Amino acid sequence: VIGEIEACRHQLRELSLKIHSSPELGFQEVKAAAWLTQYLEENGFSIERGICELPTAFRGSYGQGKPAIAILAEYDALPELGHACGHNLIAGCAVGAAVASKPAIDRFGGSILVIGTPAEELYGGKGIMAERGAFDKVDMAMMVHPGVHDTATTQALACVGLEVEFFGKAAHAATRPEAGINALEAMLQSFAAMNSLRQHIEDKARIHGIITDGGEAANIVPAHSAGNFLVRAEDDTYLDELKEKVINCFIGAA
Ligand SMILES: [Zn+2]
């Protein structure tokens, strides 16, 4: 397998750099999906494009029957930052590993799949694809993700997203401030409450978020504020518990 990878090292590097230099956001990875499927096709894989009703998802397969081993490819970029998370590398590694596994499939049987999972950064493409049956006939799935240390296995955190809005009452901030109900202040109080909570949460748990609407103008008391938050924990049980506590921060601030 190592010999096979060495043989296509140059092509894989080019492919990965090409995706890096053309970053595409989640569900818009048209070029990346085309390049990856083309590479797999040129290397003898049969390709299904747009699986699970997602235009930039795909499945490449080589060999037949069981065990069906899937290698997952991600290839979406982050807004503003491009491929800061290295999904171009994930894509290159996935197709490289799959192509290099062909001699093993020829010898031992079974099938090797590359499942292209779009929109991992912001929407969690794999979750949608799992619900739509993409992994039903897969015996084993694996992928790599670039990081700061080498490890064979990793534990991902359970994660839940919260979209929060506060509704207040607009008023002129200088002439009639007493008539306003400030929706931005409620959002800021929520951040203060979450920061106080943070001191008392389990080690690996995470709470993070951004304000997506903080008002229209400095001289208008904001009638509306909004934010997106992510709560993460080591397991679902603690995630549920922590989510309740975070929601209480918002309720308290309101
Ligand atoms: Zn990533």
Image (tube, rainbow, N blue to C red):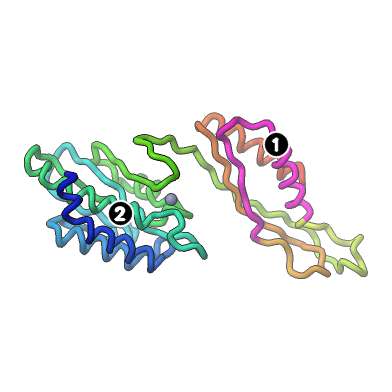
Pick the front one: 163 or 79: 79
Percent coordinates x, y for residue 37 in the rendering: 23, 61
From what the image shows, is residue 248 above or below residue 98? above
Q: Which residues are magenta?
A: 185-212
Number of the label disc, if any, that sits on residue 36? none
Q: Quadrant of residue 20?
A: bottom left
Kind of residue at badge 1: Leu
Q: Is residue 210 magenta?
A: yes
Kind of residue at badge 2: Gly
Q: Which residue is denoted by mark 2 in the rendering?
A: 116
Percent coordinates x, y for residue 4 in the rendering: 15, 49
Left/right placement of residue 129 relative to residue 65 reads right
Q: Quadrant of residue 24?
A: bottom left
Residue pictured at 59% horizontal, 31% vertical: 203
- State the SS at label 1: helix
Number of the label disc, if any, that sits on residue 197? 1
Q: Is residue 207 magenta?
A: yes
The quarter of the picture where the N terminus appears is top left
Residue pictured at 51% horizontal, 32% vertical: 234
Percent coordinates x, y for residue 137 in the rendering: 23, 41
